[in-house]
Image (cartoon, rainbow, N blue to C red):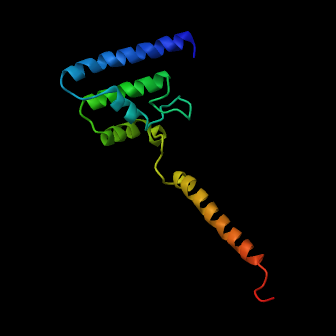
Amino acid sequence: MTMFQRLIAIAALLSTLLLATPVLAAGQTVTWQDVLDIASQYHPPGCPPSLTGATCQEKQAYDLRIEIFRLLEQGKTPAEIRQILVSEYGNDILAAPPAQGVGALVWAVPAVVIILGLGIFILIVRGRRPPVGG
């Protein structure tokens, strides 16, 4: 990470904290941890696949965290935030996409392969036993 990127990250953090101050002063309980907990469920566009909205340092992730903060500030629940983000960005924003279509295959294929492998292993082991009484 270059010095410029670090300065941007620090500025983003400080500005977010400054945005949070009036909300906390007004008696709301929106915390930075609340924002990070929700952001960890999303994959911002432009961020590496292994990073979520809570861990990515790209501008898109910062924008996502600010959007989540503002939605929480408005009293939106995590489920409502999910609906808003999915309607805005599509299912690609989800860090764990729903198990439907190709997503369901990603979960089902390994389970089927394991079950078939165990079945074949059992058949091979039974076939190698010497005959009883022989």
Instruction: Specify the quadrant that holds the C terminus.
Output: bottom right
Left or right: 101, with 17 as reference point:
right
Which residue is at a point 31% across and 15% down the rendered structure image? 18
- Residue 71: name its quadrant: top left
Query: In the rendered image, which quarter is residue 53 located in?
Result: top left
Q: Nearer the viewer, residue 127 or 78?
A: 127
Return the residue found at the far front: 133
Task: Report the front residue among 76 and 111.
Answer: 111
Q: Residue 12: x percent and y percent?
A: 41, 17
Quarter of the image for residue 114 reads bottom right
Numbered marks: total: 0
Residue at image point 55% right, 52% down: 102
Residue furthest out toward the bottom: 133
- In depth, the one of 133 and 95 nearer the eye is 133
Vertical side of 1 occupied by 129: above or below: below
48 left or right of 72 in image: right
In this rendering, would 131 be left or right of 101? right
Position of residue 83 measured from the top left corner of the image (x, y, whole percent): 35, 41
Where residue 23 appears, as percent x and y from the top left, is 23, 22
**Is residue 46 placed above or below 22 in the rendered structure?**
below
User: Residue 132 placed where, x, y %?
Assistant: 75, 86
> Is 88 or 132 nearer to us in this picture?
132
Q: Which residue is depicted at the point 48% across and 35% down?
A: 43
Q: Is residue 123 above or below residue 74?
A: below
- What residue is at 32 percent from the left and 27 percent from the top? 69
Whether 5 is drawn above or below 30: the answer is above
Quarter of the image where the N terminus is located: top right
- The outermost residue toward the right is 134
